[in-house]
Amino acid sequence: MTPLFRTVLFSLTPLVALAGAKPEPTPAEPVEQAREVYGKVSWTARHEAILARNKRVKPELVFIGDSITHFWAGEPAAYKVASPAAWKVATGGREATNLGFGFDYIENARWRVAHGELDGISPKVVVVLLGTNNLGHKKDTPEAAAATMSALLKDIQAKQPKAKILLLGVYPRREPNLAEPIRRLNKLYADMAGGAVKFVDPGAAVLADKAEGGAAPRANPKYLRDVVHPNAAGYAQVAPLIAEEIEKLLR
């Protein structure tokens, strides 16, 4: 091999390796949504209600999420609530604002944060539960959903640099095809912990007792009112675990 040929070959090697590398997922850009299927909820009206609430209420806690958070309890009130008692347990009775929006993707929460939902307040803890709609409806890969979540956490920190963030693992669902993607996404979420971000997976409390054949376990149906949303018993299972982590972050 001539010195010139050897030089050209070696110089091409990194390019060949780079061409074969899998690109990192790009976070989804902030965007509004209009997928609400319940017929009694205006996404825009709820956003405006939160902006108005921020002018008169200074919460110690903020919960950012999708319908699992939206229809749990708290203020601004939803037209239906699943478990006010479990909400009180989770919040410890503290002033809390519910930033859950039915059917939100992670990128919809990014838009909401960018457009004032964390402005004018100083919460000590921001609780985040998002991702199930990215996997189940949008059909994101766990890696794509995790990239957008990482961007959302940065958005939150930019708005609330003094707040602690409690990132919750995506709760299990009843569909067998989503059990493994949820497990993978939660592992990626766990890897984001550090500094002001704490990860916990309270959804483990609503898993079925065991999975067959080594598969990722699904949700125990006794804790769900459908394939994805907790019922009152489900919220009662996760609330103490969330409360415990909030207490740690407030110390």
Image: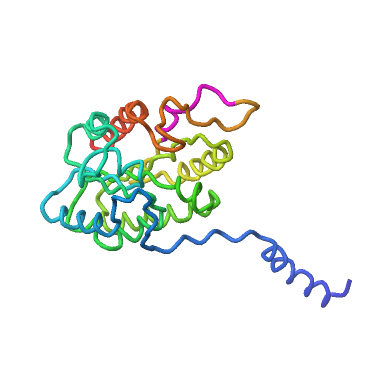
Residue 209: say if magenta: yes
Residue found 14% across the figure and 49% down from its top: 58
The image quadrant where one finds the N terminus is bottom right
Whole-percent x, y for residue 208 in the image:
50, 25
Whole-percent x, y for residue 170 in the image:
44, 40
* Left or right of 23 in this view: 157: left
Q: Residue furthest right?
A: 1
Picture colour scheme: rainbow
Q: Residue furthest top?
A: 209
| Count of numbered labels shown in the rendering | 0
* Left or right of 98 in this view: 177: right
Foreground residue among 125 and 50: 50
Residue found 37% across the figure and 57% down from its top: 108
* Left or right of 3 in this view: 203: left
The image quadrant where one finds the C terminus is top left
Foreground residue among 169 and 77: 77
| Image-quadrant location for residue 165 | top left
Residue 181: say if magenta: no
Whole-percent x, y for residue 234 in the image:
37, 29
Whole-percent x, y for residue 48 in the image:
21, 59
Q: Residue furthest front?
A: 39
Residue found 38% across the figure and 55% down from its top: 152
Q: Residue furthest bottom?
A: 4
Q: Write down the region rendered in magenta.
A: 201-211
The answer to whether 90 is drawn above or below residue 31 in the figure is above
